[in-house]
Amino acid sequence: MIAGTVLHHQNRQQRTVAEASSAPLPPDRPLRPLPSWVIPAGVVLILVVTWIAVTWLHNLAPAGGGVVEQAKLQVEGVRTGLAIGGAVTAGFALLLAFRRQQLAERTQQATEYDAGEKRVTELYVKAVDQLGSDKAPVRLGGLYALERLAQDNPVHRQSIVEVFCAYLRMPYTPPGAQLASGAASPAEAAAVPHPANPPDSGDPDKPARDPREERQVRLTAQRILARHLRPQIQNKTPNHPAYWGPEITLDPTAYWGPEITLDLTEAVLTDADFADCHLHNAIFTKANFTGHARFDGATFAGRAVFDEATFTGNAVFGGATFNDVAGYVGATFTGNAVFGEATFTGWAVFDRATFNGNAVFGGATFTGWAVFDRATFNDVALFDGAAFNDVTLFNGATFNGNANFERATLGGASYDGPSLPD
């Protein structure tokens, strides 16, 4: 009964792990080699137990009675003692057999694990190789293959995310930028044939990538990342931007956990949508956000680094939570920068940031330092209802539009005025 209970518990644990991941499991722990003294010690133990049992049972025979009866009792005592010795021997042999079975199971488990790791490596290499293809459908297939691989193998998720990030960091010129430098309209651009061998390709046998197709591939990579960094959304109304309709069911197992780190330094991101995502360390240094960038409702558990990033469209961080340093040093916001109701638990550094559109910080909460030194506000700067609970710096900041600090609180002291405090 005890053995059955233990085996049932182990099977339940294995089924739970198997449901979370279809990848082979590594051996629980390595088995130490059996010491060389175990077998001789076992033999000596068997002999000692047998001798003690035989001697004790032999002496246990009553002294009274006939000689024949006493001899029979002594013989029975010897037999019983030897039986006890045989039982101890069988028990010791059973332990050795259990040890051999355990070794066989561990060997089988290690073999399956090695085979699974080999299969994962082959699929990984093949999928990465697909990303280097000149055909957009092949690159899309590589992205989805990596997604499935990460879904089935949690231990490889971070490395696969790094592949996605590395792909997005590759040099890329959006079609809109090409239109600005050459064609007069999208229709004219579509009518212009793409050369099979562009002058700057460096390889006359390598065809050019269509920037419009590449845009779809990169959008897919962004959506895959966002889909697996977004926990299950609850209590969203149909009017909420994150509401996806009643027929859409979010799979909680699709969430890859809050420890995923993104490094999108110098990446070109088109219409990035990371709304309601949970990010750990997110590095977007010198990233170029073309189109709108959505981070509303996002949670940054670690650092959020947007130093020298460029936002060509609206940058929406409304309701976002920054639990560590939020860095926007030298960032440029061409469109509106919306940080309304955002929460900055750590430092919020907007030193030398440029806001060409509306800068909306209404209702934002700054628990740590709020640094806006040498920031430039070229349009309306809304800080109405913002709470600055620690050191607040606007040294050298330039306000070329209206600055609204009504109902803002500085260190617990309410401030109601149209310009900055001294």
Image: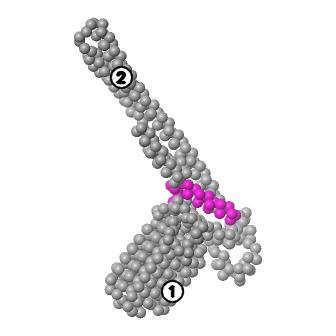
Using the image, determine if residue 349 lies above or below residue 66: below
Element class at badge 2: helix
Task: Locate residue 193, reporting x and y percent.
Answer: 76, 73
Q: Residue at x 44, y 77 (%)?
A: 342
Crowd tier of the residue under label 1, counting other residues whose Cα lies within 10 Å: few below 14, some 14–19, many 20 or above: many
Camera-near label (1 vs 2) is 2
Above or below, comparing residue 258 to residue 341 in the picture: above
- Specify the label residue 358 is tagged with: 1
Report the magenta stretch's main SS.
helix
Quadrant of residue 417 within the rendered picture: bottom left
Residue 211's place in the image compared with 25, above or below, is below
Residue at horizontal 58 percent and vertical 71 percent from the top = 244
What residue lies at 44% left-to-right and 73% top-to-bottom? 321
Mark with earlier residue (1, 2): 2
Callout 2 crowding tier (Cα within 10 Å): few <14, some 14–19, many ≥20: some
User: What colour scheme does the image use?
Assistant: one colour
The kind of residue on which mark 1 rests is Asn
Res. 133 in view: no
Residue at the spot of label 2: 84
Magenta stretch encompasses residue 135: yes
- Secondary structure at badge 1 equals loop
- Under mark 2, the amino acid is Ile
Q: In the image, which disc is placed on residue 215?
A: none
The segment highlighted magenta reads 132-159
Q: Is residue 131 magenta?
A: no
Q: Report the number of discs.
A: 2
Asked if one can make out residue 363 in the rendered structure from this viewpoint, the answer is yes
Q: Is residue 213 left or right of residue 94?
A: right
Foreground residue among 199 and 141: 141
